[in-house]
Amino acid sequence: MRSNFLGAGSLLLECLRLMRERGRGTLIVLSSVAAERPRAGNAIYGAAKAGLDALAQGIADAEANSGVRVLVVRPGFVTTKMTAGLPPAPFATTPEAVADATVSALTGRAHTVWVPGRLRVAFSLLRHLPRGLYRRLPL
């Protein structure tokens, strides 16, 4: 029996094919700040988001002249039902703020959106900290 279900990779490739045929379109990839520097407490999540970011960047480069744009959205800690009961991280945000930033970015040229925006600066610094010092931070 043939399944009509497309796996995530197949769905992604099909969306890209359709956008390429039209000569335009935007693929929005919901990533996380964890892609920049995974924490010990969520290393698997961070590794998965880092892989997703690498895939998105590769697709963006491959589609650079096709009219297809890839927009990576990197929120920090988002207060949702899933995170209820967890202590909020610094610069915590809301689903509405992530949605608003994503919609706003659609009219711009950015390829990566940080939510909130000040996390871009924070992770620019964290990315370059020596591993031993990073491990000691209360993150």
Image (spheres, rainbow, N blue to C red):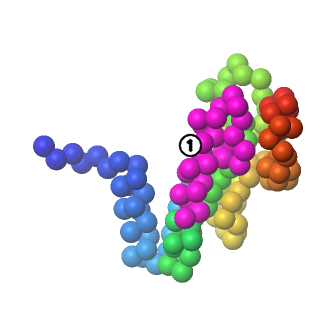
Residue 16 falls left or right of residue 139? left
How dense is the environment of label 1, judged by Cα within 10 Å: few (below 14), some, or many (20 and up)? Answer: some
**139 relative to 54, above or below:** above
Kind of element beneath mark 1:
helix
Q: Is residue 92 visible?
A: yes
Quadrant placement of the C terminus: top right
Magenta region, residue range: 31-58
Quadrant placement of the N terminus: top left
Q: Which residue lies furthest to the top in this view?
A: 85
- Which residue does the numbered mark 1 point to in the structure image? 48
Question: What amino acid is found at the position of numbered circle 1 in the picture?
Answer: Ala
Which one is nearer the viewer's eye here, 50 or 65? 50
Total numbered badges shown on the rendered structure: 1
Residue at horizontal 42 percent and vertical 57 percent from the top: 12
Q: In which quarter of the image is residue 70?
A: bottom right
Residue at horizontal 83 percent and vertical 37 percent from the top: 132
Residue 109 falls left or right of residue 125? left
Residue at horizontal 61 percent and vertical 27 percent from the top: 82
**132 relative to 18, above or below:** above
Query: Magenta span: helix, strand or loop, mainly?
Result: helix
| Residue 33 x/y as whole percent | 71, 45
Q: Check if residue 39 falls in the magenta segment.
A: yes
Residue at horizontal 46 percent and vertical 78 percent from the top: 23
Q: Check if residue 48 falls in the magenta segment.
A: yes
**138 relative to 1, above or below:** above
